[in-house]
Each structure stands twice: as structure tokens, then as C-alpha cells.
Amino acid sequence: MANLKEIRNRISSVSSTMQITSAMKMVSAAKLKKAQDAITATRPYAAKLTELLQNLSGAQDNESPYTTVRPVKRVVYVAITSNRGLCGGFNANIVKAVKAHAASNEKTMAVFSVGKKGNDILSKDFDVEGYETAIFDNLTYANAAELAQRLMDGFVNEAYDEVQLVYNRFKNAATQLVTVEPFLPLVPETSENQTDYIYEPGKEAIFNTLLPKALKMQLFKALRDSFASEHGARMTAMHKATDNATELRDQLKLTYNKARQAAITNEILEIVGGAEALNG
């Protein structure tokens, strides 16, 4: 049976780990509430703006550099992961999705890594078109717009012919959905049931003004989705880790008590045996 001191040390170590995971769970829960409110507020605006732009692009003949469809020779996947680990399969699922598309895609692929964890893995297997980690330190529309502009400029300059966003879409604290979403070029709405709006000052002017903003908002929404998903995944992972640590601590305490009882019993037997030997 294990030494009593070793068991006490293990109980102390597991208890310390449990305190850390419990604290991380509470921190992520607090950040999750704010991030969840932010993505809930962003989604309706982003969806309506995208719908309007698709309607405009399908209803008029004027083209934009961002709607130009050309033969696809090089595809860039914007892999949005986190800068830190301890969040379950959050980052691994994004890496798997990118690699799965690479396996089924004969075109030349590159990645634009948003987040340190994804870059550490994907940079070993793919060309890195870009790398961004600081954006999650201050996730604002302005910072997202700057990142989106880099992608848009690369597309216009024909450095690549297609851009796909790969991120975890937030559903709830326990569920994040891996999403692969077209970013560039913007595909016009082809439905015959398009709404016939009256535009002022005109379709072309509105389209060319709103299109860059819509693309920037689309990336901002994806980043907010991923940010909320990260905290949800980390909160869930730390909750499970705390439960496992609690179970292990209880098992160790039971083992310790059994070992202690066995040691006491042996001491009593030795005392009784010694007394009988003296009496004999």
C-alpha cells in the first residue's frame, strides 16, 4: 500500500489543481456573459447587412473588385483559434476542419492564422499568408476592420482567389459549431424572390459604399463568435476538470484512510504481540 506521506502529497497537489481549475472556470464564466451579449447584439445587424448586399449585387450589373469571380488557383483559410489552451477541443476542431478541406481540395492552400494555438500547428503544414494574435486583447470593430482590409487587399491584388473563414460559431456554453464560411468573393443572391427596394442615391453608390463595411462586419462577427465560443469551451473544460479533480481527491482520501487504519491495526497487533511475549 502506498506510503501515507505520498498519499498526503497527492491529495495536496490535486486540491491545489482543483482550486486553479475552479478559479479559471469562474473567470471564463464572467467573460462569457459579456462575450455572449456582444455576439447576440452583432448577429442581426451583420445578417441583415449581408442580405442587403447580396440583394444589391444580384439586382444590378455593376461589379466590385470584391465580387469578381475568377479561376481559383489559391485559397486562403482564415483559421480563427485562441491564444491560450485549456479549452477542450476548441482549437483542435479548427485545425481538423482546415486539414480536412486541404485533403479534399486540389487547389493551392494557405492559411491566415488568427490566434497563436492554430498558427503553432498549421504553420508546420501550410503556407502562412498572415498571422495575428493581438486582436483578442482588444476586440473592437476598428481592429477587425483593419484585419479584414488586409484580406480584402490581398484578394484585390490577386495574391489569392478565394477566402474562407473557419471559426467556432457560438451556440451555448457547451456547444460550439465549427463553421466554414465564404468571405471573398461576395456571391450575389440569385433568388428570383428578391425584394425590390427603392434606393437613394442609387444602387451603385450604396453598393460600393456598403460592401467593404459588410465584409468587415462579417469578419468582426466571426471573431466575436469565436471569442464567445472560446470562453464557453474553457468554462466547460474547467468545470469537467474540477469535477474530475474532486473525484480523484475523494478517492485518494479514501485510500489514505484505509492505509492509516491498516497502519494503526498493525501497531496494535505489534503491541499485543509484545505484551503476550512478556507475559509468556
Image (tube, grey):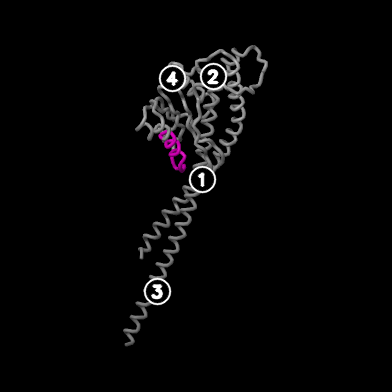
Which numbered disc, 2 or 3, marks the residue that appears first in the sequence? 2
Q: CA distance from mark 2 to mark 4?
A: 22 Å
Tag 3 residue: 265
Circle 4 crowding by C-alpha within 10 Å: few under 14, some 14–19, many from 20: few
Labels 1 and 2 touching (C-beta < 8 A): no
Which numbered disc, 4 or 1, marks the residue that appears first in the sequence? 4
- Tell me the amino acid under the disc marked 3: Thr
Quadrant, the C terminus: bottom left
Which numbered disc, 3 or 4, marks the residue that appears first in the sequence? 4
The residue at the point 49 percent across, 53 percent down is 243
Residue 10 versus residue 126 in the image, above or below: below
Q: CA distance from mark 1 to mark 2?
A: 36 Å
Tag 4 residue: 71
Tag 1 residue: 236
- Tell me the amino acid under the disc marked 1: Thr
Is 212 in front, or is 4? 212
The residue at the point 59 percent across, 28 percent down is 47
